[in-house]
């Protein structure tokens, strides 16, 4: 499948940090080895109990096996479509544009002028509580392509929130 681009973002690809890639590979390996082994043991134990037609342990183990295999397929697909986020080096903050992998310092414009720091990450690594926002989220999309001094406004469930970009790393 050819890669298509929109506003510098590859469509159909999943942006991921180096740390996120390591975690993804680790989870895949654990599911393929330990996960499969544990489920095989559960299935063997359930088979030893006799009649499989009314064996809830066997049904539960088969469901777990199906879930695990689905998760393995999902992780393999994510790895196949992963685009490693490369941190930009040596660029001065001025003139730099927000992209996936950027860390954005922004002041809230419609409240207490509180400074917030956001890391723009792929959707798999998003964790808003820790300031990691997805490039696919409304806030992440509003920041993409912007520069220091730009002001954005985003509609949230609590109303519109505005930010002025004061730094990009």
Image (cartoon, grey):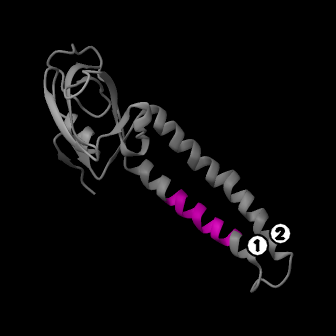
Q: Quadrant of the N terminus?
A: bottom left
Distance from the alpha carbon under mark 2 to that under mark 1: 9 Å
Does 60 sit above or below residue 6? below
Of tags 2 and 1, the one toward the viewer is 1
Using the rendered view, name the quadrant where residue 142 is placed: top left
Q: Quadrant of the C terminus?
A: top left
Q: Is residue 90 left or right of residue 126?
A: left
Membership of 102 in magenta stretch: no
Please name the residue that numbered disc 2 is placed on. Answer: 45
Q: Is residue 153 left or right of residue 133?
A: left
Foreground residue, 159 or 24? 159
Does 50 sit above or below residue 37? below
Measuring 14% from the left and 19% from the top, which residue is drawn there? 95
Asked whether disc 2 touches disc 1, contact meaning CB atoms under 8 Å apart, the reply is: yes
Residue 100 visible? The answer is yes
Using the rendered view, name the quadrant where residue 111 is placed: top left
Foreground residue, 132 or 80? 132
Foreground residue, 53 or 140? 140
Please name the residue that numbered disc 1 is placed on. Answer: 57
Which residues lie in the magenta part?
61-73
Q: Is residue 163 left or right of residue 19?
A: left
Residue 86 visible? The answer is no
Q: Position of residue 26 (x, y in %)?
A: 58, 42
Could you tell me which secondary element the residue under label 1 belongs to?
helix
Using the rendered view, name the quadrant where residue 109 is placed: top left
Mark nearer the N terminus (2 vs 1): 2
Query: Few, some or many C-alpha atoms within 10 Å of disc 2 (few <14, some 14-19, many ≥20)?
Result: some
Could you tell me which secondary element the residue under label 2 belongs to?
helix
Q: Position of residue 153 (x, y in %)?
A: 17, 36
Residue 18 shows which numbered tag?
A: none
Q: Position of residue 135 (x, y in %)?
A: 29, 41
């Amino acid at each position: 499948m050819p890669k298509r681009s929109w506003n510098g973002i590859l469509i159909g690809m999943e942006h991921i940090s180096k740390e996120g890639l390591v975690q993804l590979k680790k989870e895949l390996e654990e599911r393929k080895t330990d996960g499969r082994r544990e489920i095989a043991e559960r299935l063997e134990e359930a088979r030893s109990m006799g009649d499989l037609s009314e064996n809830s342990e066997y049904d539960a183990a088969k469901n777990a096996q199906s879930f695990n295999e689905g998760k393995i397929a999902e992780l393999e697909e994510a790895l196949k479509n992963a685009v490693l986020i490369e941190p930009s080096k040596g660029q001065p903050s001025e003139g730099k544009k927000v992209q996936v992998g950027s860390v954005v310092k922004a002041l809230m414009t419609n409240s207490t002028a509180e400074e917030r720091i956001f890391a723009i990450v792929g959707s798999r690594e998003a964790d808003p509580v820790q300031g990691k926002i997805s490039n696919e989220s409304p806030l992440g999309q509003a920041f993409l392509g912007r520069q220091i001094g730009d002001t954005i406004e985003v509609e949230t469930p609590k109303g519109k929130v505005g930010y002025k970009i004061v730094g990009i790393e």
